[in-house]
Image (cartoon, grey):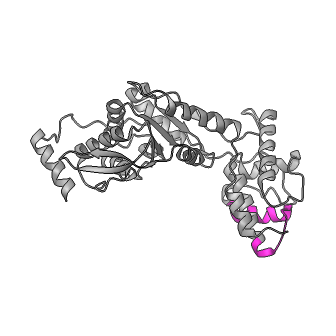
Amino acid sequence: MTMDADEAFAQIDAIFINHPTFARVRRMVRNIIELPHTKTAPCAHVSGPSGVGKSTLRECIKAEHPPVKDGAEVELLGGLRMKTDRFKVLIVRMPSSPTVKALAREILKAYGDEFWNRGDEYTLGDRVDRYIAANGTRAIVIDEAQRAVERSGTVVSDKLIDWIKSRHETNSVAFILLGLGSLRHLFQADRQIRRRWDAEIRLEPYRWFRADGSPDLEGQDDFIALLATFRDLTPIPFDFDIESEEVAFRFFYLSRGLIDGVKKVLLMCARLMKDNGQTSIDLPLLKQAAEEAFPLEEEGMQNPFSEDFVAIAPPPIEDDYQVRIAKSRSKKSAGKGALSKKRLNQVVISHLVK
């Protein structure tokens, strides 16, 4: 019985491979979340290039720690009480224009706060603290955290970093940052945040060659094992031996060792099969899929499934660490713009009742 192309596409898209490196990183993050609630919660940052599995890690964390419906009650300043789902782990994305207000609002929105878009920095921070306490939140995961660092290497907002440190210190909640390698400049620019965070946890692409250009036999075996797992989980048969070194290298060249690249070309095969009526994956189909799924010419790459492919190392993927380190922006003087306690309470109540 021939599988429908749409169903095949859905099955390939749902493939999850818990390969050894990913499993190790996932276990390290899980251990941080599951540690007993202590005075100083550990924090971590996981980095890697695009397509290496950070989004998959985020979804795994989300699946392992789903919210409990209406599990918490929060009392806000002014006596207002709100019901909220209970989040042991809260997951948000760093705003594209990261500021204290923007991140605080993302966190409050994720908690379900009806007034997430109201308030100044003080009232927003106070509400975040109250939600963390009421939920018993153990960890806050911030994806796309490298947005806090400009392309020049400059920390976008020292005030934002201080705000994160304050939430960590006040609530003993773990912060887990996911992002590109350029995230490291955040820690190079601020000794205090470097002291609070564990060493970088790195998700790397598969390797076919070592840094000196010699074959990485262990890396090759791991990548071939990955392809074999894809073959076993893909509902479409292959008309060739995917475990042969020659074919495996073609897949490596196209994907440059990124698991996302392997899945991308297989998904394109399923899309093309819907139009051409093929019932199996062969090399000509892969050639067409590579042409339509990847900007080969723009990247200076060959089509590895073409007849005239020359087996050389692929161009390196963009270095996700590569930004120029610049001096962090100077901090604004402490106390500038401070409000009296009476005025703060007025602002809080006015924002909540609007």
Where in the figure is residue 51, as x and y percent of width and height? 62, 49
Name the residue: 71% across, 64% down: 9
Compared across the picture, whether 62 is left or right of 149 comes to right
Name the residue at 28% across, 55% down: 115
Whether residue 50 is situated above or below residue 236 in the rendered picture: above
Quarter of the figure with the C terminus? bottom left
Numbered-mark total: 0
Provide residue 236's location: percent of width, then percent of height.
81, 61
Task: State the image coordinates of residue 175 (x, y, percent, origin top left).
Answer: 44, 36
At 81% from the left and 52% from the top, the residue drawn is: 231
Task: Report whether 345 appears left or right of 314.
Answer: left
State whether residue 207 is above or below residue 193. below
Q: Is residue 68 visible?
A: yes
Estimate the x, y position of residue 19 in percent, counting from the top left: 70, 40
Residue at 23% over, 51% down: 119
Instruction: Classify residue 265 as left or right of residue 238.
Output: left
- Viewport quadrant of the N terminus: bottom right
Please tell me which residue lies in front, 350 or 213: 350
Q: Viewed as shown, does residue 36 lie left or right of 27?
A: left
Which is nearer the eye, 275 or 66?
66
Q: Is residue 67 magenta?
A: no
Q: Which residues are magenta?
A: 274-296
Q: In the rendered structure, does residue 276 fall within the stretch colored magenta?
A: yes
In which quarter of the view is residue 27 placed?
A: top right
Q: Report whether residue 98 is seen.
A: no
Main secondary-structure element of the magenta-colored stretch: helix
Front-most of residues 107 and 191 = 107
